[in-house]
Image: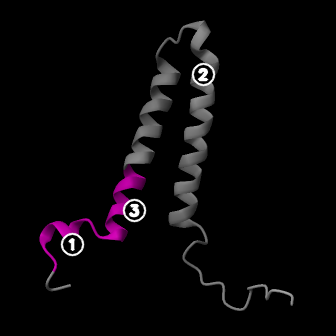
């Protein structure tokens, strides 16, 4: 790690995951606020709600990755192939 530049240190895999998760949750929050308080034309309401559902699902995935069981090791639970 001593030979890495500051750019490479900042954009390590773990840092990049955190940055992308932060951006995803921020975008979800902004979209939720816009859908809630901004008047949407009636012909676009279904599209807005579908996009909102997709973003909430994505936010849920991000949340579960960071606070769920993704960091636990699953040793001994692998299924052996049948011969």
Q: Is residue 57 left or right of residue 27?
A: right
Q: Position of residue 43 (x, y in %)?
A: 61, 8
**Farthest right residue?**
83
Mark 2 or mark 3: which comes first in sequence? 3
Residue 47: give its label. Answer: 2
Question: What is the CA distance from the residue labelled 1 to the residue labelled 2?
Answer: 40 Å
Q: Which residue is mark 1?
A: 9
Residue 55, relative to residue 9: is it above or below?
above
73 or 36, nearer to the observer: 73
Mark 1 or mark 3: which comes first in sequence? 1
The quarter of the rendered structure image containing the C terminus is: bottom right
Magenta span of residues: 4-22
Is residue 61 covered in magenta?
no
The residue under the point 26% across, 65% down is 11
Q: Which residue is mark 3?
A: 17
Contact, CB < 8 Å: mark 1 with mark 2?
A: no
Label 3 crowd bin: few (<14), some (14–19), many (20+), radius 10 Å = some
Residue 79: give its label. Answer: none
């Amino acid at each position: 790690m001593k030979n890495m530049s500051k750019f490479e240190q900042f954009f390590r895999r773990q840092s990049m995951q955190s940055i992308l998760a932060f951006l995803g949750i921020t975008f979800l929050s902004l979209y939720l606020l816009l859908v809630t308080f901004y008047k949407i034309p009636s012909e676009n309401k279904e599209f807005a709600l579908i996009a909102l559902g997709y973003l909430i699902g994505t936010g849920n995935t991000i949340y579960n990755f960071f606070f769920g069981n993704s960091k636990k090791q699953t040793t001994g639970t692998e299924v052996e192939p049948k011969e």
